[in-house]
Image (tube, grey):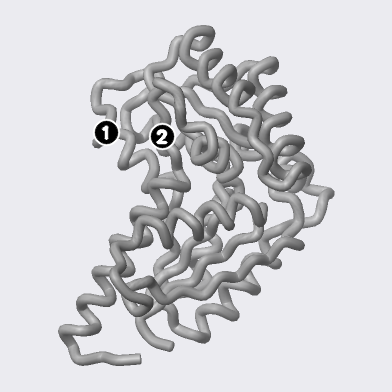
Amino acid sequence: MKDFFTVIGGMGTMATESYIRLLNERTPTKRDQDYLNYILVNHATVPDRTAYILDHTKPNFFPVIAEDIKQQATLHPDFMVIVCNTAHYFYDDFQKLTDIPILNMPHVAIQEMVKKYPEAKRIGLIATEGTMADGIYNHEIEAAGREVVMADHDIQMEVNELIYHDIKENRGEVDGSLYHHILSEMKHKMHTDAIVLGCTELSLAQEKAPDHHYRVIDAQSIIVDKSIELAESNRKAARENGATD
């Protein structure tokens, strides 16, 4: 297969399913052949990312994802997407493994945030405790000239419940009221101008419970659009050069 990209997912599987569903729904199509070519690596047994980031005695997820990247690189995809915000803890090290571009979800998300909400200055961040601790989004938000507002302990406990209990344990069941309450707390208690959803499970919550008025930066939704944009651009270039499958 030519003219394709690789999705490295399974972290978790329900969130990856959301990425694929949105990817297919948003791709402009009139026939089977209009859909995008991609390989999905749903590596569900990757060790817990947050557990390792918070405690380096826990199993390290780097060599597991690194092996996936090296295997996929032999197939020569146009680019790769890692459908897990927390896994971007090792983004620079992952990219060093291959010349094939790996989309940087946090970077792309904050670039889009600046375009969409240029007046927003206090940017709330909700994510796994691993992402909160590793500073991936903090760096991107601060580099964009904005102030990072972290969830406090009480809000973080609610975020954890939504991510790990509602979605990971209960196969994608989303308590919309809990999700909306978290957004309300970040907006009114923490006084934020916009809120970054720095976890793909939170992106699934946004997909299933979008009926609110809060300004959110949905990293997974944004990387879906970026994937389509880049894949269609590569497909067009391939057609113009006469390449076929």
Residue type at mark 1 is: Lys
Q: Secondary structure at mark 1?
A: helix
| 239 w.r.t. 193: above or below | below
Reading the image, the residue beneath label 1 is 116
Give x and y (percent) for residue 182: 58, 20
Q: Secondary structure at mark 2?
A: strand
Residue 123 appears in the rendering: no
Instruction: Give whichever of 16, 116 is nearer the camera.
Output: 16
Crowd tier of the residue under label 2, counting other residues whose Cα lies within 10 Å: few below 14, some 14–19, many 20 or above: many
Q: Give the CA separation, mark 1 to mark 2.
A: 9 Å
Residue at the image position 56 percent from the left and 70 percent from the top:
40
Reading the image, the residue beneath label 2 is 217
The earlier-in-sequence mark between 1 and 2 is: 1
Badge 1 vs badge 2, beta-carbon distance below 8 Å: yes
Classify residue 26 by image quadrant.
Answer: bottom left
Residue at the image position 25 percent from the left and 21 percent from the top:
119
| 245 w.r.t. 39: above or below | below
Residue 161 appears in the rendering: yes
Residue type at mark 2 is: Ile
Judged from this view, the residue extending furthest toward the left is 240
Location of the C terminus (image quadrant): bottom left
Instruction: Give whichever of 9, 47 is nearer the camera.
Output: 9
| 172 w.r.t. 225: above or below | above
